[in-house]
């Protein structure tokens, strides 16, 4: 037999065999490829409240800050606010105790409600203080000052001035009013830290959020006269008077520390620190405490000059 014919026949037989095997494998793999993947069983979930944006310590919780999110049921721990047992209205007026980040679950332990112990301390910003001042219908803007508003604090008083330059001493009563603090946040009116029904209410006290030095000024000012509130616009575009006040107070504190470093053991505020009209010709005489004195002798007469 011709060897070439044998070789050709063998190659043809090998090709037919390979084609047959390939066709058989394709037929076996087709059902596997067409079969849908086996679906995994869905994990049970529960809707819980999470925060949509970053909330700082003491921030008031508003509906737009929250969103319901599906959460694996086996990951829900005690304290999470679960849908069906809690609603957004339950958090009206509440604040967060600690800083929270977007997507973080809200828990009962991290929320403090009005009336709860420590609520006011949670509302006050770090580094600031809460002080209360007496008000009435006139000094409280007829009850239209609400928690969350910003006000200026005015000091009003009168003093009797002795005119020592006249031949006969003449007493004169002078009235003064000055802006003591600016852009101060109102934390509460009476014992309320939010206004239910947005109704005007004549109150007896207003609780303000101030810097420590400003708290001293209010304490001293209450001994001088009466404090009243001046309501600021919600759309205020004025200079940041809070920062300006901080700078002025820092400069005053540094000057006092340089003047008497040996006796300064803490922050203090005197009447001269809050009365801007002291030393003004139309205002109040400068304090004679600590003034230099010179004894003057003219013939047989002696007198003391202070400056």
Image: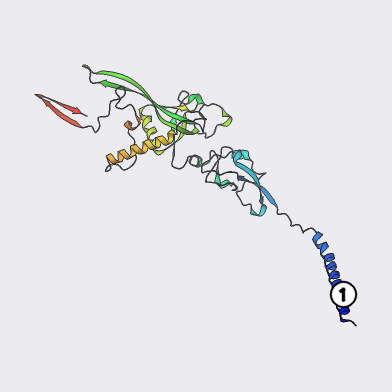
Please, is residue 228 above or below residue 63 in the view? above
Expressed as whole percent of the image width and height from the top left, the position of residue 97 reads 52, 45
Q: Nearer the viewer, residue 44 or 282?
A: 282
The image quarter containing residue 156 is top left
Q: Residue 17: image x %, image y %?
A: 86, 72
Residue at horizontal 87 percent and vertical 73 percent from the top? 12
Give the left or right position of residue 160, taking residue 3 as reference: left
Left or right, 232 with reference to 296: right
Is 28 or 283 nearer to us in this picture?
28
Question: Residue 100's x, y, as percent?
Answer: 55, 46
Q: Quadrant of the N terminus?
A: bottom right
107, above or below 245, in the image? below
- The way the protein has been coloured in the rendering is rainbow
Compared with residue 221, is residue 121 higher up or lower down, i.e. above or below?
below
Q: How many marks?
A: 1
Identify which residue is drawn at 85% across, 69% down. 19
Q: Which residue occupies 45% across, 27% down?
A: 229
Q: Is residue 36 left or right of residue 250?
A: right
- Circle 1 residue: 13
Q: Is residue 36 left or right of residue 253?
A: right
Where is residue 135, by image quadrant?
top left
Quadrant showing the C terminus? top left
Callout 1: SS = helix
Closest to the observer: 203 or 64?
64
**Residue closer to the observer: 8 or 65:** 8
Among all residues in the image, which is located at the extreme bottom? 1
């Amino acid at each position: 037999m011709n060897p070439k014919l044998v070789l050709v026949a063998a190659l043809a037989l090998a090709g037919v065999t390979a084609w047959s095997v390939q066709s058989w494998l394709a037929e076996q793999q087709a059902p596997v490829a067409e079969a849908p993947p086996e679906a995994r069983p869905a994990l049970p979930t529960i809707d819980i409240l999470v925060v949509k944006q970053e909330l700082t310590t003491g921030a008031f919780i508003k509906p737009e800050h929250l969103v319901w999110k599906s959460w694996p049921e086996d990951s829900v721990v005690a304290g999470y606010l679960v849908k069906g047992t809690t609603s957004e209205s339950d958090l009206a007026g509440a604040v967060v105790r600690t800083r929270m980040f977007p997507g973080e679950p809200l828990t009962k332990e991290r929320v403090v409600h009005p009336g709860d112990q420590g609520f006011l301390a949670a509302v006050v910003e770090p580094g600031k203080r809460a002080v209360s001042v007496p008000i009435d219908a006139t000094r409280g803007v007829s009850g239209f000052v609400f928690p969350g508003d910003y006000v200026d604090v005015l000091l009003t008083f009168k003093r009797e001035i002795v005119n020592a330059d006249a031949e006969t001493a003449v007493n004169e009563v002078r009235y003064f009013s000055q802006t003591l603090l600016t852009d101060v946040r109102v934390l509460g009116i009476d014992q309320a830290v939010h206004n239910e029904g947005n109704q005007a209410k004549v109150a007896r006290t207003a609780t303000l959020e101030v810097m420590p030095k400003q708290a001293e000024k209010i304490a001293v000012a209450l001994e001088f006269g009466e404090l009243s509130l001046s309501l600021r616009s919600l759309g205020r575009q004025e200079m940041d008077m809070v920062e300006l006040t901080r700078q002025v107070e820092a400069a005053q504190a540094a000057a006092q520390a340089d003047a008497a470093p040996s006796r300064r053991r803490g922050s203090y505020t005197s009447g001269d620190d809050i009365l801007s009209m002291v030393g003004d010709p139309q205002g109040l005489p400068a304090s004679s405490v600590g003034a230099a004195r010179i004894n003057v002798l003219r013939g047989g007469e002696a007198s003391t000059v202070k400056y």
